Image (cartoon, helix red, strand yellow):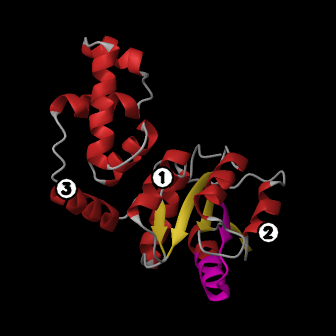
């Protein structure tokens, strides 16, 4: 699907309820990339496309169109398109939403304010297998992280990094030469400092704050 985005026509699905947005992007990508573009106006129609035999290189998913139910719908889109790059396509969405969507498997976030010329290069990048996040996302994440004096210790940061790659408490204890009880104590401290309830939320919050 993504073996050579520069030498093959791309297949793109636009799921957005704004007719003007759909038509403008359809025309622009068709002309600029010789792309085969399909456009739908709600999540129900998108599901119909997902259920067909067609595999799209890139799926632009508006998260505020009719039928969308936040991250649960994003996750469903990703699960139904294992061979496609699902991308959040929105005018305004929080960094925490994007962080969670990335954890679910989306390949990036394209703001609707992105200039048309940049959109072409971004679509090519994503279709080649890369992830895209706008500079505004990184700048906001860095700002959030710099202002968050959370008191995370170096040992707790190591625990967070192991959590991010899916290690269990037992595996973390072995890697850090600690007891499991000590790892659990670090976990309780991390959750308290990040104001979260569990290890998954801790990792997502750390990503949101640009700690990981």
Residue 182 lies, with reference to residue 135, above or below; the image says: above
Residue 91 location, x and y as percent?
48, 77
**Left or right of residue 171: residue 50:** right
Res. 45 image quadrant: bottom right
Residue 175 location, x and y as percent?
30, 14
Please give the residue where the numbered disc 1 appears in the rendered image.
100
Please give the residue where the numbered disc 3 appears in the rendered image.
148
Along the line of sight, which residue is nearer the eye, 51 or 123?
Answer: 51
**Chain part drawn in magenta:** 9-28
Q: Which of the two discs, 2 and 1, labels the residue nearer the N terminus?
A: 2
Tell me if residue 15 is in the magenta stretch: yes
SS class of the residue under badge 2?
helix
> Given this view, does label 2 or label 1 mark the residue nearer the observer?
1
Q: Which of the two discs, 1 and 3, labels the residue nearer the N terminus?
A: 1
Q: CA distance from mark 1 to mark 3?
A: 19 Å
Q: Are marks 3 and 2 in contact (CB under 8 Å)?
A: no
Q: CA distance from mark 2 to mark 1?
A: 24 Å
Along the line of sight, which residue is nearer the eye, 96 or 62?
Answer: 96
Residue at the (34%, 19%) spot, across then down: 172
Along the line of sight, which residue is nearer the eye, 49 or 152?
Answer: 152
**Left or right of residue 197: residue 142:** left
Residue at the (30%, 43%) spot, across then down: 192
**Left or right of residue 143: residue 196:** right
Residue at the (47%, 55%) spot, across then down: 125
State the mark number for residue 45: 2
SS class of the residue under badge 1?
helix
Residue 85 location, x and y as percent?
59, 52
Residue 28 location, x and y as percent?
58, 78
Tell me if residue 177 is in the magenta stretch: no
> Given this view, does label 3 or label 2 mark the residue nearer the observer?
3
Which residue of the protein is positioned furthest toward the bottom in this rendering? 20
């Amino acid at each position: 699907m993504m073996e050579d985005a520069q030498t093959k026509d791309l297949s793109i699905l636009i799921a957005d309820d704004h007719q003007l947005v759909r038509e403008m992007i359809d025309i622009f990508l068709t002309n600029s990339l010789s792309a085969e573009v399909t456009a739908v106006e709600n999540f129900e129609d998108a599901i119909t496309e997902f259920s067909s035999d067609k595999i799209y290189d890139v799926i632009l998913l508006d998260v505020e169109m009719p039928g969308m139910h936040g991250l649960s719908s994003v996750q469903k889109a990703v699960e139904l398109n294992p061979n496609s790059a699902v991308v959040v396509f929105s005018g305004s969405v929080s960094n925490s939403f994007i962080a969670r969507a990335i954890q679910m498997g989306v390949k990036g976030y394209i703001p609707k304010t992105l200039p048309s010329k940049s959109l072409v290069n971004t679509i090519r990048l994503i279709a080649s297998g890369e992830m895209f996040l706008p500079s505004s996302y990184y700048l906001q994440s860095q700002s959030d992280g710099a202002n968050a004096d959370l008191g995370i210790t170096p040992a707790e940061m190591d625990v967070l990094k192991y959590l991010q790659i899916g290690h269990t408490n037992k595996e973390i204890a072995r890697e850090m030469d600690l007891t499991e009880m000590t790892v659990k104590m670090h976990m309780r401290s991390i959750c308290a400092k990040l104001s979260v309830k569990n290890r998954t939320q801790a990792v997502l919050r750390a990503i949101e704050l640009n700690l990981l």
